[in-house]
Amino acid sequence: MTLADRLRAALDAGRAAAPELLTGDLHALELENAPPATQAAVLVAITDRPEPGVLLTRRTETLRAHAGQVAFPGGRIDPEDPDAVAAALREAREEIDLPPHAVTVVGTVAPYRTGTGYSVTPVIGVVRPDVSLTPSEEEVAAVFEAPLAYVLDPANHVRETAMWQGRERHYIRIDWQGETIWGATAAMLVNLSKQLKW
């Protein structure tokens, strides 16, 4: 059984179990009063090796939004994108030069609503571990790989609290070899850990 097959089976099992997922950064009352979300997608690229990893990027410090943060490759769904999968693959090509044909798409996870107004659909895909990647100088400072088992392990999901826009917010932080994964990216990994009966 291939890694993609194993992930599909795990995703199906997780959907059948219907775990309670994190839905977003905003509270229910804030969501009621929020404008419609901008649709976006990210690629959760999992490397096909005996101990699979997940590809993550650290954004450049010069970006207007989320500068310096760890994120999945991704962005808004453009009008010419037929769906979230196409958008995630396009963005991965633009950000880290990952060819779409090098990705075996496994499926999607429920969208996550960010406090910055995006509804983000995570797209799970499998890539060869030797695929050549070139970060976009304008958007990506670095690409790194963290072990999938590590980032999905609830023992590594640290709950944090901070004040944001006058409200106390709760978020998840995952630390890996000097990189801090937090906010929406960490929340999507938490959802993945709940939905993948790995």
Image (cartoon, rainbow, N blue to C red):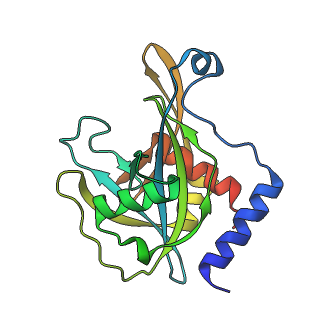
15 vs 154, left or right, is: right
In depth, the one of 173 and 44 nearer the eye is 44
In depth, the one of 168 and 132 nearer the eye is 132
Q: Is residue 107 above or below residue 64?
A: below
- Counting from the top left corner in percent of width and height, residue 157 is at 56, 48
In depth, the one of 170 and 114 nearer the eye is 114
Residue 69 visible: yes
Q: Is residue 92 above or below residue 71?
A: below
- Counting from the top left corner in percent of width and height, residue 118 is at 47, 35
The number of callouts visible is: 0
Q: Is residue 24 above or below residue 69?
A: above
Which quarter shows the C terminus? bottom right
Which quarter shows the N terminus? bottom right
Q: Residue at x 30, y 64 (%)?
A: 96
- Counting from the top left corner in percent of width and height, residue 110 is at 64, 47
Q: Residue furthest bottom?
A: 1
Q: Residue at x 69, y 53 (%)?
A: 194
Q: Residue at x 65, y 21 (%)?
A: 28
Quadrant of res 123: bottom right
